[in-house]
Image (tube, rainbow, N blue to C red):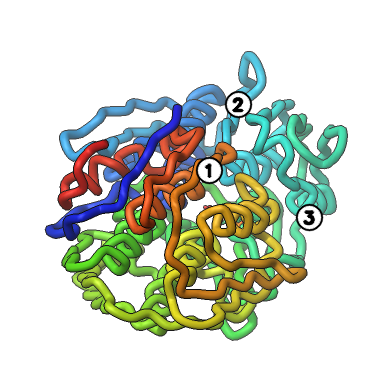
Amino acid sequence: MEYTTAPLEVPLDGRVSVPGDKSLSHRAVLFAAMAEGKSELSGILDSQDVGATIAAVGNIGAEVDVSPTCDGSLDVSVGGWGSAGPSSPYGPLDCGNSGTTARLLLGILAGWEIEVTLTGDRSLSSRPMRRVLEPLSSMGARFVSDSGTLPITVHGSELMPIVYETSVASAQVKTAILLAGLRAAGRTSVREPAQSRDHTERLLPAFGVPVGRDQALNSCWVDGPATLKSASVRVPGDPSSAAFITAAAVLIPGSDVTVTGIALNPTRTAYIDVMKRMGADILAKPDGVHGTEPVGSLHVRHANRLRAATVTADQIPSLVDEIPVLALVAALAEGVSRFEGVGELRVKESDRLTAIVDGLKRLGARASAEEDTLLVEGPSALRGARLDSLGDHRLAMCWALAGLVAREPVTVEGFEAIDVSYPRFLDDLASLGMPHT
Ligand code: S3P
């Protein structure tokens, strides 16, 4: 499906609450499935990615009951398999487009004596899984995979604990190892080159499993064997979805928008600091804690003048999903913005680094990638274009946003990719005043 956005002549104005956080929704469902007893989850994101996780755990023995609510989120009650372990599914588990589903399930299944095949769509089947298979194999799990990508068959077995240093800062890799560590006798610890999002470290204790942390060393650990206990979890709004609304309000003249109820976890909100450094008028107001996550609102007003910013490699993990939208903002800011150490973007839902450069150039902006650095020179007056989402939800939303701030309309092919993380994207923009085209 294609969708065209046209230059917006009216400001965005009002309050909006974005849907539940994707990373937390996956973790809440997976941890509840692993737990002994019945967990009650609310605010769960209703999207394709989280749907893949819900379906997967239902196929391996969790008792899942999903109720849509009037705010568009899901209430999910999950009877976990606990110490009985997951059961063998009838066929392969389809992880769809979701890297989090695939990588976390590999860690969860590695320590149980079952044989399960994980599959995914074309994009997910080309994404690197060796980064998870290697540590899990050295713990004792066995995998069959042609080339270190999906489909992968897990032959779970008894595991040994591991002390592991990852070469990339990845919350998915870290979480897979920690979850496998719950099936090994002794301490399993993971150290990363930079701090990745820490939802697992925060949420596992709510399911009765302590997680040790040394934040100065970017390391964390669990002591196994351990069984999770059921919990009640309320998932706050997704800061990565809020980033699109925030950028729209920053860029569209006269806008004044408040995004409420989002997770203000510092391992996720670095994009706010970067936009502020660029001259954006954003006030983040913490207003409490939802279970394990700080939450609050963002008050965003249009910025008359934006300037370029440099984002260094150590900051990338805490804004890794926001680089497409930050690059779009950079195209409208004065000077050369640098995003250093962004090589990981090549193995996201698409090769985002190439796609950002190509897309911005087609919009008439100046952008280039030099090894692992993305350079965007602005300000450019963006022109209309026809751009392919490449099946990547964040690109689909980024290019739709470009159409709101360009001189001419932008058509996004494969726009349905937004269903992966933010099916309500257009409705939320419409609620702030964007006319439906
Ligand atoms: C995620 C972690 C990040 C992020 C992805 C979701 C998670 O990936 O890009 O959208 O839920 O743990 P990596 O951990 O591979 O960096």
Q: CA distance from mark 1 to mark 3?
A: 38 Å
Q: Residue at x 20, y 60 (%)?
A: 260
Amino acid type, label 1 = Leu
Q: Does residue 165 appear in the picture of this structure?
A: no
The residue carrying mark 1 has its beta carbon less than 8 Å from ligand 1: no
Q: Are the residues tagged 1 and 3 within 8 Å (C-beta)?
A: no
In the foreground, 243 or 381: 381
For label 2, the residue is 94
Q: Assess disc 1: are there few (<14), some (14-19) or many (≥20) residues with their C-alpha within 10 Å of its C-alpha.
A: many
In the image, residue 378 above or below residue 226: below
Residue 135 shows which numbered tag? 3
For label 1, the residue is 387
Q: Does residue 170 appear in the picture of this structure?
A: yes
The quarter of the image holding the C terminus is top left
Pinpoint residue 18: horizontal percent, then vertical percent: 27, 51
Q: Residue at x 14, y 59 (%)?
A: 13
Pinpoint residue 2: horizontal percent, then vertical percent: 44, 31
Amino acid type, label 2 = Asp
Q: Residue at x 53, y 43 (%)?
A: 387
